Image (cartoon, coloured by chain):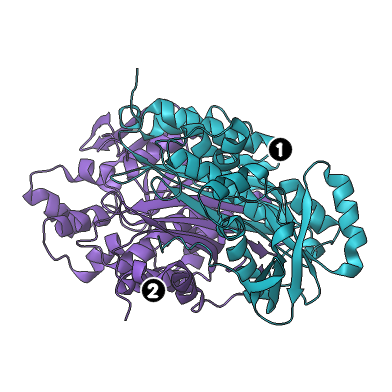
Chain colours: A cyan, B purple
Amino acid sequence: MYDTVADLGERALIARITARLSMPTWVLVGPGDDAAVVAPDRGALQVLTTDAVVDGVHFDQRFVPPDAIGHRALAVNLSDLAAMGAQPRGALLSLVLPESLPVAALDAITDGLLSLAGTHRVALLGGNITRTPGPLTLDVTAIGSVRPRRVLTRAGARPGDEVYVTGIVGEAAVALQMLRDGLTPAPALRDRYLRPQPRVRAGLLLGRNRAATSCLDLSDGLADGLRQVAEASGVGFTIDAEALPVTDEVRAWYGTRGENTVDATLAAGDDYELLFTVRPSRKGRLRAVRGQLGDLPITRIGVVTRARELRVREAGLLRELPLGFEHFRS
Amino acid sequence: MYDTVADLGERALIARITARLSMPTWVLVGPGDDAAVVAPDRGALQVLTTDAVVDGVHFDQRFVPPDAIGHRALAVNLSDLAAMGAQPRGALLSLVLPESLPVAALDAITDGLLSLAGTHRVALLGGNITRTPGPLTLDVTAIGSVRPRRVLTRAGARPGDEVYVTGIVGEAAVALQMLRDGLTPAPALRDRYLRPQPRVRAGLLLGRNRAATSCLDLSDGLADGLRQVAEASGVGFTIDAEALPVTDEVRAWYGTRGENTVDATLAAGDDYELLFTVRPSRKGRLRAVRGQLGDLPITRIGVVTRARELRVREAGLLRELPLGFEHFRS
């Protein structure tokens, strides 16, 4: 029996992962050569993104199980593709492993990643494995495709547009706080942090229906997302505090701590919902998206303003948005 | 003045890099959105590869200056594209940074990477920056394109093919040993390790002229490369020790240490030359490549055998190849 990845060795680790893969026909050369070769999606543009997750920075192995580490590493990248309106196609995986990592943990990381990849029909095209004297680090590059006139960017929001968000916000941050405090969140709440579901179909439908003027995914919180769209589009936002899609559970969590639920929710990260803007004259297109999307809630939370300020209206009072989260300022 | 990357913060670090970039027209959305969007190279297949470099594993900051770290991180990936016969187009960069890293070091890393990118007209399409409690880690994903019938893989070598290598082998390993020992290699020798030149043009010409039956790049040494082609193609090799393109400097280095130059050179990593096979009936195509390539030597070093063994012929005697290098077994 091999206990750690160092016992097993690089080639055997690679073979252990590639043995589990099946390649779609558009993959002409898969893992095992110097590089992957794929046939392009004809008539489409290529979309590419990369994001790394580091133990102790983006997750904590004490309460994030290995399968969730693999799931999250891919999910954050698929979420970026979704925010562009892209169909995900493939991924490359860089595994940077401490020598003491149990082989069983690597297997579970692979499980989590491949399970999510299967859900979205994403092919693992290649990658590399290296050891590190530091923390477990996974870097995923995801590629996708999008038709030319269906690309969603952060730069198209215009004054008068309405602001929407998919799903429910703030739950992932509460789940993370509970896990950090040694509490046991209910499974559904816990998975909002551990196994976020990238809004691939919502992004695709927003692009296909040409319903959104701008879109991004909420990795670092609503306040941060709004600020980024504001900067890219040269606009401002007024958010309606009462409209935020927040559960009673989240309100109760902040209430018992004497924290303002609205401020906490605006600053809360890890939701991986889509934030997007819609021109009022195109609300019919948004209705079409809702019709095709099914259960996922889509909630109007505010408006785009000409004034380049970020404000929240709560109990009739306008005030500035709280600051968001920045990875290097901890 | 900001001294460390933690002082400066994530957004300012990203802005500091993106301010230096210029985008070709085929990049429709560059860094700064959720993902990059690029127009495909029409009629071409897409080639993708990713490779991470870790301080203390793939380089040592004590003798690898920051610009060389950036250069090497991109070079190893461009070398993988070259081995497929691909034209490089773009790269994504994941920077995993210790908080104490000086901003000046990050600037120099960027210098080295962008300088090599400029040489090969590679666009930096996007990336991400995160902190780590561990060592400096760079993960680069490179993308390129290749025409359908020009793809080079490891799987096409056939018995009777002749084996070739570009450039000179073994110098990088000697330079690394000298640097580790606190010696000062001559600048040209030193740069064989610090700033390897990916054989992009050689790979392109081998593909375009359809001269090679197989190809890979020598990241982990000749012995390792031969073993990988042997496994992928289901063949063996007999290498002619006297034919190896080794300099007198390298022979002297091993000679004074009482080491066998041939064994040491076969095991030596970090060369990033191309190893490829040519069918004897297609030597005319190889002549065309030589004519178009200019100064870079191309040396015949052996033959492909039906017997699936890896052997070296030295002073009339046949013996087994020494083992190569494996990252997880140090």
Residue at horizontal 31 percent and vertical 57 percent from the top: B168
Q: Amino acid at mark 1?
A: Thr
Q: Which residue is mark 2?
A: B111
Single out the mark in the foreground, 1 or 2. Answer: 2
Can you give x and y, in whole percent of width and height, for residue A161 in the image? Answer: 80, 71
| Residue at the extreme top of the image, as rendered | A1
Q: Is residue B47 above or below residue B258?
A: below
Residue B215 picture location, percent across and down: 48, 47
Closer-to-camera residue (A126/B46): A126
Which residue type carries mark 2?
A: Asp
Give me the disc on residue A25.
1
Label 2 packing within 10 angstroms: few (<14), some (14-19), many (20+) = many
The answer for which chain carries disc 2 is B
Residues at marks 1 and 2, CA–CA distance in whole angstroms: 40 Å
Residue A301, picture quadrant: bottom right
- Residue at x-position 84% and y-position 61%: A211
Asked if the residues shown at circle 1 and circle 2 are in contact, with their CB atoms under 8 angstroms apart, the answer is: no
Question: What x and y, as percent, mark residue B83?
Answer: 49, 51
Q: Is residue A237 above or below residue B273?
A: below
* Residue A135: numbered disc: none
Left or right placement of residue B258 versus residue A112 in this view: left
Answer with left or right where residue B24 lies relative to residue B119. Answer: right
Name the residue nearer the viewer: A140 or B237: A140
